[in-house]
Amino acid sequence: MAVRTWLRWGIVLGFALGGFFDGILLHQILQWHHLLSLVPGVDSIRQQVLWDGYFHALMYLVAAAGLWGLWRNRRHVGEWGARRLAAALLIGFGLWHIVDSVLSHWLLGIHRIKLDSPDPLMWDLIWFAAFGAIPVLLGWVLLRGSPDGAGRISSRTAVLLACLLTAGSAAWSLQPPEDQRFTTVVFAPWVRPADAMDAVLVNRGRVLWSDRAMAVVVVEVPHSNRLNFYTHGALLVSGTGVTSGCFNWSRT
């Protein structure tokens, strides 16, 4: 139990390191986006940098909590503490990028990895795989390996990796050609026509065709705004790499 607690605090520290990596590389060095780049009303670079600062301050608190937990449980590390710590840091690092992708990029839509890209979802998926899924898998394999470092990838791990690669390839295959300007949106039955039109206007779109109930519409909309339709009751948005309304297909 004590070793598991120590590992959890290592994951917390790795989560903070993932946040620092994201903020320093993407917000400051490459300047591909800021934390609230796509949030209406946060328009000036001063506001964007301010919120980046709040984000880094939060990561400092998370990192401090992780270090405090590791220090408190240091006596329970055991002989293979360095190996376990490396595994925990990798898992936490990857978890940050998975959480950031799902929450910030796709659910809330507050920013994307590369805002000026004609296909921002491609960059989201690359970042999700390279810095999210792969570090988590590596950390898990390292953690389950034998203490002498001779651990091998189990059949379950191989199947999981194959599933992730297959899912990524499937999502990539759903991307439209670069010159495809139009998007088809299928709304849920409970979405009223007025709400469907509001969703189009909010996302800076233009209706080209719709049925009478506006349950199915064809719109011209910026590529970076397509995923936002899922937060307005869409079940399917073509060209997003997401089918069946994964973010909004049911009500509770």
Image: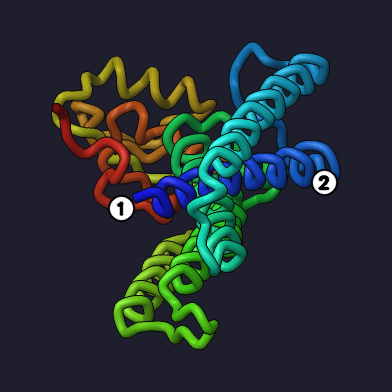
Question: Residue 126's quadrant in the figure?
Answer: bottom right
Q: How many marks?
A: 2
Question: Residue 83's quadrant in the figure?
Answer: bottom right
Taking the image as shown, residue 153 lies to the left or right of residue 79, namely left
Residue at the image point whose x is 81% and y is 20% from the top:
45
What's under tag 1, amino acid-wise? Thr
Q: Nearer the viewer, mark 1 or mark 2?
A: 2
Mark sitting on residue 178? none
Give the SS element for disc 2: loop
Taking the image as shown, residue 60 lies to the left or right of residue 186, namely right
Q: Is residue 18 above or below residue 65?
A: below
Q: Position of residue 123 (x, y in %)?
A: 61, 55
Residue at the image point whose x is 32% and y is 79% from the top:
159
Q: Position of residue 23 (x, y in %)?
A: 72, 38
What's under tag 2, amino acid-wise? Leu
Q: Pick whichever, 228 or 198, lies toward us.
A: 228
Q: Pick whichever, 10 or 230, lies toward us.
A: 10
Residue at the image point whose x is 63% and y is 47% from the top:
18
Q: CA distance from mark 1 to mark 2?
A: 31 Å
- Which residue corresponds to mark 2? 30
Seen as rendered, the residue at the extreme top is 41
Residue at the image point whose x is 25% and y is 41% from the top:
235
- Which residue corresponds to mark 1? 243
Taking the image as shown, residue 86 lies to the left or right of residue 249, namely right
Q: Pick whichever, 76 or 248, lies toward us.
A: 76
Q: Is residue 46 above or below residue 35?
A: above
Q: Which of disc 2 and disc 1 is earlier in sequence?
A: 2
Q: Quadrant of the C terminus?
A: top left
Q: Position of residue 225 (x, y in %)?
A: 52, 36
Question: Residue 153's quadrant in the figure?
Answer: bottom left
